[in-house]
Amino acid sequence: MAIGFIGAGNMAEAIIKGLISNKVYNCDEINISDISDNRLEYMQSAYSINTFKYNNLLVSSSDLAVLAVKPQVAGEVMEALDDFPVDKPVISIAAGLRIEKITKLLGDRPVIRVMPNTPALAGWGAAGIFANKKGEKHLPLAKKIFSAIGEAFVLSSEDDMNIVTALSGSGPAYFFLLMEEMINAGIELGLDEKLASDLTIQTAIGAAMLARQGNNDSETPEDLRKKVTSPGGTTEAALKELENNQLGALVMLAVSRAKQRSEELSKV
Ligand SMILES: NC(=O)C1=CN([C@@H]2O[C@H](COP(=O)(O)OP(=O)(O)OC[C@H]3O[C@@H](n4cnc5c(N)ncnc54)[C@H](OP(=O)(O)O)[C@@H]3O)[C@@H](O)[C@H]2O)C=CC1
Ligand SMILES: O=C(O)[C@@H]1CCC=N1
């Protein structure tokens, strides 16, 4: 079984790295195509995988195609895929690209939509997965692929994909922004950049690990927050400022806007 990636960008690389290090596929079973020769040369030298200049040649040499180009070019990429047998499954990771559009352009076939995220690069990804009826029998393989780079969650409705995109697909950027702002605050208040950065990142890792442990022990992030917050103490003073400035409403607004953008991309 050869797997073929159309688009050799960040997400394709993250997935391929996980597949190779977890021995889900051998290097010689992984194919990749891209419009950039430089990118293909890099992928070939870094991972010893098979590279293809043309997407058509890639799919004809693959048993499963992974659509890993930007949603804005996915339509033209699919339109140019000739003679792609309809029994071959497609996995699409493109934000907002609906299964209906994929089957319209590539024929009524097994399709699995996946929304991964960039922590997959470190093996800590979170992915939402949804298959059409024909794709359901390929769900175990899709789960295996995305479990190699983190955790994979099967969704019961394709519509939930827009929420997953807004929450975990884009989510890493929200945490990175918070980290950037905390580092800036540390620097502005007098720490040197390296120390502010080290403390912030270690705190983010610690909080995430604790939240993960809590998730198994029925301890919610709210419970954990309360344990940090001594009455009349420093955390309480900080959290009051965040509450007074409507952090909750702001997060709701940001996630809703991302969901709306995912819906808009569905119409492109
Ligand atoms: N980045 C993220 O956090 C996430 C991204 N996604 C989705 O994953 C998909 C890929 O994203 P990402 O990896 O970040 O994007 P990238 O831009 O890094 O990767 C896409 C790659 O496809 C190449 N490409 C463009 N046109 C073609 C073509 N006609 N044929 C073959 N290759 C082509 C691009 O080349 P060039 O750069 O030269 O145009 C680029 O190398 C997107 O649809 C995105 O919505 C999903 C979850 C998270
Ligand atoms: O920003 C984007 O559109 C993509 C999808 C989720 C994360 N990155």
Image: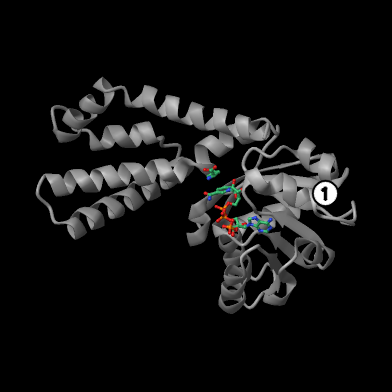
Above or below, 35 against 164 in this view is: below
Q: Crowdedness of circle 1 by 10 Å Cα count: few (<14), some, many (20+)?
A: few
Position in image of residue 99 (x %, y %): 76, 39
| Residue lying furthest left | 190
Above or below, 21 against 126 in this view is: below
Residue at 53 percent of width and 35 percent of height: 166
Residue at 14 percent of width and 56 percent of height: 192
Quarter holding residue 223: top left
Position in image of residue 155 (x %, y %): 67, 37
Q: Amino acid at mark 1?
A: Lys
SS for callout 1: helix
Above or below, 114 against 63 in this view is: above
Give the residue pinned by disc 1.
137
Query: Is 39 left or right of 65, judged from the image as shown?
Result: left
Position in image of residue 186 (x %, y %): 17, 47
Residue at 70 percent of width and 34 percent of height: 158
Quadrant (top left/top right/bottom left/bottom right) for the N terminus: bottom right
Above or below, 174 against 247 in this view is: below
Which of the pair 237/64 is nearer the observer?
Answer: 64
Color style of the picture = one colour
Quadrant (top left/top right/bottom left/bottom right) for the C terminus: top right
Position in image of residue 41 (x %, y %): 60, 75
Q: Is residue 139 visible?
A: no
Q: Is residue 54 visible?
A: yes
Which of the pair 75/195 is nearer the observer?
Answer: 75
Residue at 21 percent of width and 26 percent of height: 241
